[in-house]
Each structure stands twice: as structure tokens, then as C-alpha cells.
Image (tube, grey):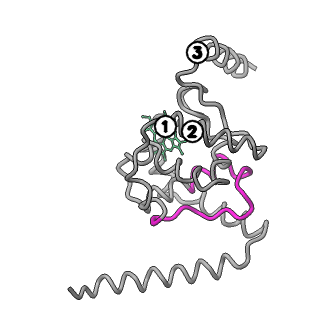
């Protein structure tokens, strides 16, 4: 069946891709910095984060405690070094199962890395897109903890330091992390 709307949309998308690749040609420290600044400046993403994610991840991105909800600060950008890390960020239940559309979720993920962890992004960082989100979002993890553990082991091998995620860890490890967090907060 002929659907004019469909072709119009395809035309629009390829136009955007062309614009983006023209920009991507000039990647360097300065252009990366301005890209990160513009991702962070999205007020729509800021509002979506505060309404849909901030209740758990907190307004400062530090999570509820250092154990149950991982800290985004100086950490979440490391995940974008690996394709499976980007995929994990989309498929994690709080993101995938949110009420946000694919384009909005892509914008929020960009806002999160640009706001809380810009210095951990790879030099060739490419923003999340609606298409990237839509492609993997429907696939739920059987075991999120296991998926995260595999990715963080790989990141650590690359010399990167993602935040700990101790949910389900033995009680002594959990309590030690709490005590360390309390001591840090008291400083
Ligand atoms: C009900 C609480 C809750 C809400 C709401 C929530 N999350 Fe999460 N988020 C978590 C938990 C818990 C984890 C740790 C992985 C897991 O157990 O699901 C997590 C992990 C993540 C991670 C990976 C962080 C890491 O270091 O592993 C990302 C990215 C993320 N969430 C994005 C979002 C986004 C985007 C939203 C809003 C659209 C959101 N989350 C809403 C609880 C939440």
C-alpha cells in the first residue's frame, strides 16, 4: 500500500542523518565538549529525568544508597565505551519500562551521561538515538545483575571504574559499603 507519510518521514530522517554526519566530520575535543554541553542543556530531558528517573536515581544522580541503585556520578559514561554497555543502559528495567517514548529515552540517557559523567565518555562518543533505543528496548534481561557484572568486568579490564553495585552481595560487604558511604557523607 502506498503511504505518502511514510516516505516523507524517511526523507526527513535521511536529511537528519546527513546533517549529523556533516557535524561528525569535525569531531575533536572542542566539538565533543560543545556536543556534551548541548545534550546537557535539554530542558525536556531534564524534566523527563526528574519525573521518571529522579525518584530512584535522585536529583544529584547518586542513587538512593551506594548499594541498591548505582551512582551515575563519574561512572555511567564508562558504559558507553562498549556496545553492550550502551545496550545495557537502554534495557535496564527502570529505563526500558519507563513511560518515555524511544526518542525521549534517548534524550534522557544523553542528558544523564552529559550531566553526571561527561569526563568518562570516549572521545568518539555518539549520542543515543531513538532508533538505537527502539532496536534493543523490547528485550528484557533475565538477570540484570549478571548482565551488569559481565560489563563492569570488561570495563575494569579497560582500566575504567564503573560504580559498585552491591545489591544481593553478602551482608558483610553490604554493611562495609554502607559504613564507608556514611563516613564519606559525614566528612
Ligand atoms: C524504581 C526505581 C528506578 C527508577 C524509577 C529508574 N531506575 Fe534506573 N536503575 C534502578 C536500579 C535498581 C538500577 C540497578 C540495576 C537494576 O537492578 O535494575 C538502575 C540502573 C540504571 C542504569 C544503569 C546504571 C548502572 O550503573 O548500572 C541506568 C542507565 C538507568 N538505571 C537509567 C534509568 C532511567 C533513564 C530512568 C528513567 C527513565 C530510570 N533508570 C528509572 C532503579 C530505577
Identify whether 68 is placed above or below 75.
above
Within 10 Å of disc 3 (Cα), the crowding (few <14, some 14-19, many 20+) is few
Mark 1 touches mark 2? (CB < 8 Å): yes
**Residue at the image position 61 percent from the left and 27 percent from the top:** 66
The residue that label 1 is drawn on is 144
Mark 2 touches mark 3? (CB < 8 Å): no
Magenta residues, start to end? 110-131
Badge 2 marks a residue whose secondary structure is helix
Q: Quadrant of residue 151?
A: top right
Residue 181 drawn at (x, y percent): 67, 21
The response on whether ligand 1 sits within 8 Å of label 1 is yes
Q: Quadrant of residue 150?
A: top right
- Name the foreground residue: 135 vs 142: 142
Badge 3 marks a residue whose secondary structure is loop
- Mark sitting earlier along the chain (2/3): 2
* Mark 2 to mark 3 CA distance (whole Å): 17 Å
The residue that label 3 is drawn on is 170
**Residue at the image position 67 percent from the left and 14 percent from the top:** 176
Position of 73 compared to 131: left or right? Answer: right
The residue that label 2 is drawn on is 148
Amino acid at each position: 500500500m502506498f503511504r505518502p507519510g511514510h516516505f516523507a518521514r524517511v526523507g526527513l530522517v535521511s536529511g537528519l542523518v546527513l546533517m549529523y554526519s556533516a557535524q561528525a566530520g569535525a569531531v575533536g575535543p572542542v566539538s565533543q565538549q560543545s556536543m556534551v554541553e548541548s545534550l546537557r542543556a535539554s530542558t525536556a530531558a531534564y524534566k523527563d529525568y526528574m519525573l521518571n528517573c529522579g525518584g530512584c536515581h535522585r536529583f544529584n544522580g547518586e542513587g538512593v544508597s551506594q548499594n541498591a541503585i548505582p551512582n551515575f556520578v563519574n561512572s555511567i559514561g564508562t558504559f558507553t565505551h562498549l556496545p553492550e554497555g550502551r545496550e545495557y543502559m537502554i534495557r535496564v528495567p527502570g529505563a526500558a519500562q519507563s513511560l518515555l517514548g524511544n526518542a525521549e529515552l534517548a534524550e534522557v540517557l544523553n542528558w544523564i551521561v552529559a550531566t553526571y559523567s561527561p569526563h568518562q565518555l570516549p572521545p568518539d562518543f555518539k549520542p543515543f538515538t531513538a532508533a538505537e533505543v527502539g532496536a534493543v528496548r523490547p528485550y528484557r534481561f533475565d538477570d540484570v545483575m549478571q548482565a551488569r557484572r559481565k560489563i563492569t568486568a570488561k570495563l575494569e579490564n579497560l582500566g575504567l571504574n564503573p560504580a559498585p553495585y552491591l545489591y544481593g552481595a553478602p551482608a558483610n560487604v553490604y554493611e562495609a559499603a554502607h559504613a564507608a558511604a556514611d563516613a564519606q557523607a559525614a566528612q
